[in-house]
Amino acid sequence: MSAPAPAAATWAKPNRCGVIAALDTPDPARALDWAAAVAPHVGLVKVGLELFCAEGPAVVQRIAMHRPVFLDLKFHDIPNTVAGAVRSVCLEPPAMLTLHAGGGGAMIEAARRAAEDAAGPRRPAILAVTVLTSFTTEGLAETGVSGGPAQQVLRLARVALAAGADGLVCSPHEVSRLRDAFGDAPLLVVPGVRPAGSAAGDQARTATPEDTARAGADWLVIGRPITGAADPAQAAARIAAGLAG
């Protein structure tokens, strides 16, 4: 397999851990308001399934006027289908794009090739989602996976990186293990991050922004602690200041 292309400017490794604000709403007007408010304090904004399914690709272009977009659609299908989906979203390429590592090496390699063909040097970073932050050991066992989240994250990470993924999505609990196993090269994008005193919600494997950054994360994906605050801009600024030390 050929060596990875140089990182595009919008998703190159940051000098210090940065924040991605998750715009989890089906309402485009609300998402745009949030994006405008938090833009001075975050590096990227996340468009996920809820907003994308409600509004389609056009909303990505509108959101990207404020900050580069982390498009979190978690593709998981046969390689040809995923390649076609990647080509479609790369017409106006986001900065980062997710797919499930569980789709296997052939799917991940097909996704990367499709991104390169469709967007060239402007292609998004291909990020492989390992184990969702809502999963516990018991939840994984229900699906037939033994050994718990940490072991499964490492298994899937090896497959994804060997197939050409630029980085991984994992919970805060696996960051240091991934750094020990794979070094500084992979981008590590981490949801399940909760400032001290915040409710965990439906996340099972969480940590604070400061602890997650110290473990070696590149980007923290933070939604409700920002967008659910009375002043999202102030909440984002406070988190960013904490990471700056």
Image: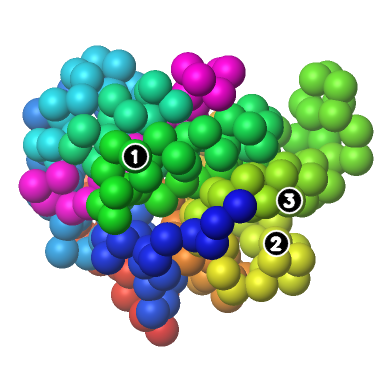
Q: Is residue 79 magenta?
A: yes
Q: Please, what secondary structure does the residue beneath circle 2 have?
A: helix
> What whole-number distance in Å separates the C-alpha atoms at marks 1 and 3?
24 Å
- Marks 2 and 3 in Cβ contact (< 8 Å): no
Residue visible at 48% across and 66% down in the picture: 218
Q: Residues within 10 Å of mark 1 (few under 14, many from 20)?
A: few
Q: Residues within 10 Å of mark 3 (few under 14, many from 20)?
A: some
- Marks 2 and 1 in Cβ contact (< 8 Å): no
Indicate the amino acid at tag 1: Asp
| Of the two numbered discs 2 and 3 in the rendering, the one whose residue sits closer to the viewer | 3
**Which quadrant of the figure contains the C terminus?**
bottom left
Residue at the spot of label 2: 178
- From this viewpoint, is residue 134 visible? no
Name above or below for residue 50 compared with residue 156. Answer: above
Residue at the spot of label 3: 158
Q: Position of residue 210 (x, y in %)?
A: 51, 70
Which residue is situated farthest in the right direction here? 147
Indicate the amino acid at tag 2: Leu
Which residue is situated farthest in the front direction here? 2
Residue visible at 10% across and 36% down in the picture: 62
Indicate the amino acid at tag 3: Arg
Snapshot quadrant of residue 117: top left
Instruction: Give, as a single range, the part of the protein colored magenta.
Output: 64-82
Residue at the spot of label 1: 117
| Of the two numbered discs 1 and 3 in the rendering, the one whose residue sits closer to the viewer | 1
Q: Earlier in the sequence, mark 1 or mark 3?
A: 1
What is the number of the mark on residue 107?
none
Q: Residues within 10 Å of mark 2 (few under 14, many from 20)?
A: many
Q: Is residue 172 magenta?
A: no
